Amino acid sequence: MPSIERALLSVADKTGIVEFGASLHARGVTILSTGGTAAALRSAGVPITEVAEYTGAPEMLEGRVKTLHPKIHAGLLAVRSRPDHVATLRSAGIAPIDLVAVNLYPFAATIVRPDVTLVEAIEQIDIGGPALLRSAAKNYAHVVALSDPVDYRLIVEELAAHGAVTATTSLGMARKAFAHTAWYDGTIARYLAGQEDGAQAFPDRWFLACEKVRDLRYGENPHQGAAWYRMAGASSLIGDPLQGKALSYTNLLDADAAIGCVREFAEPAVCIVKHANPCGVGIGATLAEAFERAQAADPVSSYGGIVACNRPVDRTVASAIVEGFFEVVLASVFDAESRAVLAARKGLRVLVCDLSAPHMVRVRSACGGLLVQEPDALAEEPATWRVVTTRRPGTAEQEAMRLAWRVAKHAHSNAIVLASAERTLGIGAGQTARVDGARIAAMKMTARPVPAGDVIAAASDAFFPFRDGIDELARAGVTAVVQPGGSIRDAEVIAAADAHGIAMCLTGARHFRH
């Protein structure tokens, strides 16, 4: 068990350091320190020895070099059970250092600033701190490496109880220190890979630097453990719930899907998601109108769903939401009146989301590794589509096609979306045959009456491999179809559309979502 006679305290985050230093001093521990940490301890009456005084080497290069010295690292790395190491320290006049408390320059907090420059980011790369933590953690049998202020209390308690830090705790602190320096270096590597000069979307070594937000109750099922991590240097799409139960694994998956879909629209829009698929999307002159249309699109599937809004939620929208049953509601702003209304549903999770956050790379595990891809941020507009049928789509049909196409991008493949100009009418997603997606979308639509005068357009996330999908859509009353094209049977599919009097546009881009 490491006994503590000499400690080095040098922290960027000063939380709890004065109290910790005072506790160590009360136990007779000699304290070495640097810079701002030394000033904070000294002003609180805690005696310290400056590292520069101890090493005989003054800080240089504006503090870039202060702890990188043999008297520091030999004091950390010497294995106390080896006579040759002890003799080397004695002959060099070096005292062992038994504890290091170090946390690092705030690189991750710096790079999330939208106006940060590369020069400013580089200045926040800590050199001496990671070296201290790694030296101490490597020699954890004799040295305690503290990288997190939350652990100060535990060390104080163990010293009071045992006069030393237990071997189990010291090993745990070493694990934590190496994880911290790995996360720190990974964050730097990811940031530099993305810089414009020689930027690499997919470098040879790809680092996923994350920190835990919280443990989750369980994963998709109760027998699966799960946790939520946030990528370092990335803006989080959502914050902690303003009210309601703790977030679950599936809540977070659905929230991500709902935000991704609703941010496609510039006009007031609402997306309701169930099991990571949109089940109802509506747009309108107001958010209240958009919500009414989204829920009407599939009221059965929306039960227990996730609601995402791209406008501030007011009392009117909140009142409509609490009339149904939803697990989560997301928006960028909830006014005071809406908060009061939503509070009536105690279990309802209310989340503020950042719809302006940049799109992130998509990461998922597969075959013992990770698959990484760019976000699907392509947003084609009707003006870029190619009309391939005899009949051209009318204005209302183009608007319906546009809505259907944007939603199809966020439904799992094979996806068919039926829509009017204002809301989805039926969605068939996650099917192994595209024709089945068309049948399910049509079945969903026939469960609710389509308002008289509404056009019915369809979008397919990928090409139609056969004409049977078009035949099914024609039977459902579809008059316009938008799809990527690219099938060896495009001519057959287009001929089927012409035979049914359907207008068809090709986008030239598909949107698979697996």
Image (cartoon, rainbow, N blue to C red):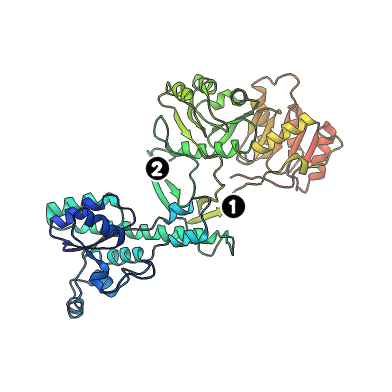
Please name the amino acid that badge 1 sits on. Glu
Residue 172 lies, with reference to residue 481, above or below; the image says below
Residue 367 visible to an observer of this rendering: no
**Number of other residues with Cα within 10 Å of mark 1, as a class: few under 14, some 14 to 19, many 20 or more:** few
Disc 1 marks which residue?
A: 374
**Quarter-of-image position of residue 387:** top right
Q: Where residue 287 appears, x then y in whole percent?
A: 59, 26
Q: In this rendered view, identify the residue nearer to me: 389 or 328.
A: 328
Q: CA distance from mark 1 to mark 2?
A: 28 Å
Q: In this rendered view, identify the residue nearer to me: 479 or 356.
A: 356
The residue sitting at the right extreme is: 390
229 relative position to 20: left or right? right
Residue drawn at the location 50% of the way across and 58% of the way down:
191
Count the numbered circles shown.
Answer: 2
Residue drawn at the location 46% of the way across and 21% of the way down:
341
The residue sitting at the bottom extreme is: 91
Disc 2 marks which residue?
A: 224
Please name the amino acid that badge 2 sits on. Gln
Please report contact status of discs 1 and 2: CB closer than 8 Å, yes or no. Answer: no
Q: Where residue 225 appears, x then y in whole percent?
A: 38, 43
Helix, strand, or loop for circle 2? Answer: loop
Q: Earlier in the sequence, mark 1 or mark 2?
A: 2
Q: Where residue 180 appears, x then y in whole percent?
A: 36, 57
Residue 135 lies, with reference to residue 366, above or below; the image says below
Helix, strand, or loop for circle 1? Answer: loop
Q: Where residue 156 appears, x then y in whole percent?
A: 18, 52
Q: Give the quarter of the figure containing the C terminus.
A: top right
439 relative position to 222: left or right? right
**Quarter-of-image position of residue 347:** top left
173 relative position to 453: left or right? left
Q: In this rendered view, identify the residue nearer to me: 217 or 435.
A: 217
Residue drawn at the location 81% of the way across and 31% of the way down:
394
